[in-house]
């Protein structure tokens, strides 16, 4: 099937549907993890993402946050967060500022930097993955098309922390950010 989805820079969009309805497939095709989607973003400048690798899409601001944990358990919390620097090519100081911004949003829900990611509970690991995605988005504010596709962003999050996830999204959407969840 084909279709069009229009998202303006300040929009926050949710895609719902039953299990097996294609939501995750849509997300993965949009960012190039799965082939088969013609992705074109219209604006200044207009860009066609179809032929770009997932890494090149990320560098231009098209970011995917998987529904699973998505962390590297053999790295520390900080080393997992530093992965966000790759597509942005951010300086160390810009990275530290972005980490401070993300920590302000999620406070104590993110484990200490030095903690081994392999020691995190499932919910803590999920917050680490969310924090890395948010961090990537903060670092790519000036990308041509800052757009985040979060696949089931509250999956695996402690029930008491679930409301914090959608509440934090508008803060990340400030000046020039358009998260998609």
Image: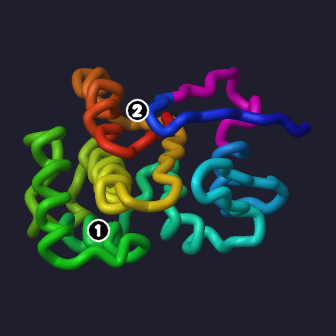
Height in image: 88 above or below 154?
Answer: below
Q: Quadrant of the N terminus?
A: top right
Identify the residue at image location x=28%, y=45%. Answer: 127
Identify the residue at image location x=26%, y=72%. Answer: 82
Q: Is residue 12 visible?
A: yes
Q: Is residue 125 visible?
A: no
Which region is colored magenta? 13-24
Marking on residue 143: none
Q: Among all residues in the image, which is located at the extreme front? A: 44
What main secondary structure does the magenta stretch of the protein show?
A: loop
Instruction: Name the spot of residue 170 as percent of width and height, x first.
Output: 32, 30
Q: Secondary structure at mark 2?
A: loop
Q: Is residue 70 left or right of residue 167?
A: right
Q: Secondary structure at mark 1?
A: helix
**Along the polypeptide, which appears first: circle 1 or circle 2?**
1
**Mark 1 highlights which residue?**
80
Q: CA distance from mark 1 to mark 2?
A: 19 Å
Identify the residue at image location x=29%, y=21%. Answer: 163
Height in image: 167 above or below 103?
Answer: above
Identify the residue at image location x=61%, y=68%. Answer: 54
Instruction: Name the spot of residue 78 as percent of width and height, x first.
Output: 18, 68
**Mark 2 highlights which residue?**
154
| Tally of marks | 2
Q: Is residue 147 left or right of residue 158?
A: right
Within 10 angstroms of label 1, few (less than 14), some, or many (20 or more) residues?
many
Instruction: Name the spot of residue 75 as percent of width and height, x first.
Output: 26, 74
């Amino acid at each position: 099937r084909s279709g069009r989805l229009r998202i303006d820079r300040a929009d926050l969009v949710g895609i719902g549907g039953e299990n097996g309805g294609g939501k995750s497939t849509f997300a993965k095709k949009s960012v190039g993890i799965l082939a088969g989607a013609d992705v074109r973003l219209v604006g200044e400048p207009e860009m066609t993402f179809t032929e770009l690798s997932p890494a090149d899409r990320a560098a231009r601001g098209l970011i995917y946050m998987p529904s699973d944990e998505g962390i590297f358990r053999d790295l520390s919390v900080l080393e997992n967060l530093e992965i966000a620097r790759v597509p942005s090519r951010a300086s160390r100081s810009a990275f530290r500022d972005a980490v401070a911004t993300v920590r302000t949003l999620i406070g104590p829900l993110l484990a200490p930097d030095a903690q081994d990611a392999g020691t995190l509970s499932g919910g803590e690991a999920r917050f680490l993955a969310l924090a890395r995605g948010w961090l990537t988005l903060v670092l790519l504010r000036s990308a041509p098309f800052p757009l985040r596709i979060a696949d089931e962003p509250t999956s695996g999050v402690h029930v008491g922390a679930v409301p914090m996830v959608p509440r934090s999204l508008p803060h990340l959407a400030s000046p020039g950010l358009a998260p998609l969840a």
